[in-house]
Amino acid sequence: MPESLVIETADLRKHFGQVEGLRGLDLQVPAGSIHGFLGRNGAGKTTTLKILLGMMRPTGGSAQVFGMAADRPDSSVEIRRRTGFVSEDKDLYEYMTVEQMIRFTAAFYPRWRSDLEQRYRRSFDLPPDREVKALSRGMRTKLALLLALCRGAELLILDEPTSGLDPAATEEVLQALVAHVASEEMTVFFSSHQIAEVEQIADRVTIIDHGQAVITGALEDLRQKYRRVQLVFDGDAPQIVFHAAGIVRVERNGRTLTVVSSAGSEGIIEETGAFNPVSVDVLPVTLKEIFLETVLEEN
Amino acid sequence: MLWYKCWLETRWRFLIGLAVLACSAAGVVLFWPKLMELLPLASSIDVGGEIGRRIKESVEVSREYRGYIWSQWFGEKATELGTLAAVVLGVGGLLSRPSALFTLSLPISRNRLFATRAAAGIAELLVLSLVPSLFIPLLSPAVGKSYGIGDAMVHSVCLFIGAGVFFSLALLLSTVFTDLWRPLLIALLAAVALGLSEQLVRDLHGYGLFRVMRAEAYFRKGELPWQGLLACAAASAAMLYGAAINLARRDF
């Protein structure tokens, strides 16, 4: 595995009886990136994260973190020593207080960052003597984030970090995350089905659907490559069989022909030139549209 | 810190168990004078059959203080309450949500996690077996009697090793089911079934797990039930090993 990749999976498979949770997932997360892992509910996001952390064993393929096999118990312990994790349900010990939770977690990490702990205690305003079971959803998320960020980890794996939070709490958590990553050298791999939050903080994205990666790359590259070409004709839009690479979807509606491409607009414009369109508009495509186009195409 | 976590998870079960067992042991000792008053009345009880035979046997054994302590405490209450405490101490703490994923995200192996949980439970079970039984020699002078610490220790060790089987069974079941109730109910049902079968099948009675816990051979002949103790220890070890394997293989 190249030095620059923190996470790499190849043909990763996971079966739950007859159900295929992962169907040959290929994933690469470069060091230093904030990598969004987008997918619908049940697409295989949480399963992937659990395999990376050794909580689940793959049925086939390989998963490596820091160049170590995630399914080997000894290397899995080392992976977790260098990784911070926040689960979707923010699983913490209900019977412990905030203070006990912090002291308990800190004991497992020799590189525990007391300076960050003090900073986040203040900024998150966590009541030290309150039991976890008495914390609000937002407070619990902040505590889980503190416990993950202060581990001195090189990799942060977050499973739906803002699920169940109101918009204000979501913004607070995302801001804290971005500020932390800006000041520390680390890689963040986070799953979400909130496209807006991926657009807000990620620089790379992988879209997973039915257990397979359907799109992966730098967010900026995706924005550059994906184009919606809207052509208007004098009469009804012609039926054109496109040969250009990267055609995602073609839609005819009266005089209008809309083509979505993942490889720019040049090939489409060239191929439609012979049909003399009245007007040609090339429009950018948002991540939400890319996601929907891809997932709809897969279905 | 894993010890601390185990302690926080089991402390109330342990402390309640300790209080109940200690009170029960103290109650047995302090009831001795009252029993002496009631014992002459027992000879007038005329019940036939197996139940009558057992009542007479119990009355005969209880005429002497050592026999009374054995029949009321080590042979009955300590065995029953010890079994219940062992099962209650054995359930939970490994797969139960909502904290399992957080625990598994820590840089510790599942074997270490299991070993700590098992060791903490065994240590608590040892305290529950020893401390209430030591109340017997300590409180006996209060009723004008004495009871050997050595005898109490031997009975406690037999109780501990026997109850360890139920603890191990509960822990094994806790690696199969994610909730608390199924391991608890299945282990308790197993204990009840075993107890009934020992009562009903007289051939089995001589080799039963509860007979080992009661240490009847030690009380009657001064002999330790070595075979039974070794069998219990082996069964516990096998179930703990199975639980560790089960936990290591499990997906979360």
Image (tube, coloured by chain):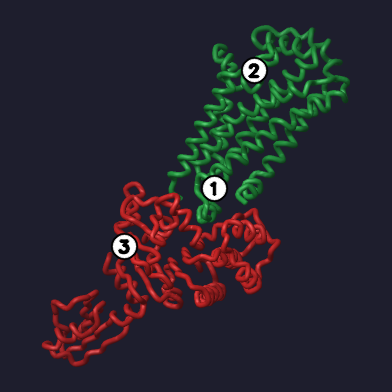
Looking at numbered disc 2 in the image, what kind of residue is underneath it?
A: Leu
Apparent colour of chain B: green
Disc 1 designates what residue?
Answer: B96
Q: Chain of mark 1?
A: B
Q: CA distance from mark 3 to mark 1?
A: 32 Å
At which x and y percent is residue B210? 61, 22
Q: Chain of mark 3?
A: A
At which x and y percent is residue B190? 55, 28
Determine which of the numbered discs, if any, sits on residue B224 in the image.
Answer: 2
* B110 on left or right of A104: left
Q: CA distance from mark 3 to mark 2?
A: 63 Å
Determine which of the numbered discs, if any, sits on residue B3 in the image.
Answer: none
Return the residue nearer the eye: A275 or A1.
Answer: A1
Mark closest to the chain's N terminus, 1 or 2: 1
Q: CA distance from mark 1 to mark 2?
A: 39 Å
Looking at numbered disc 3 in the image, what kind of residue is underneath it?
A: Asp
Q: Taking A17 as reference, is A219 above or below it?
A: below
Whether residue A233 is visible to the viewer of this picture, yes or no, is yes
Q: Which chain is red?
A: A
Which quarter of the rendering shows the C terminus of chain A?
Answer: bottom left
Q: Chain of mark 2?
A: B
> SS of the residue at dot 2?
loop
Looking at numbered disc 1 in the image, what kind of residue is underneath it?
A: Ser
Same subunit under labels 3 and 1?
A: no
Identify the residue at horizontal 66%, vertical 26% (top origin): B157
Determine which of the numbered discs, if any, sits on residue A26 in the image.
Answer: 3
Identify the residue at horizontal 57%, vertical 12% (top origin): B202
> SS of the residue at dot 1?
loop
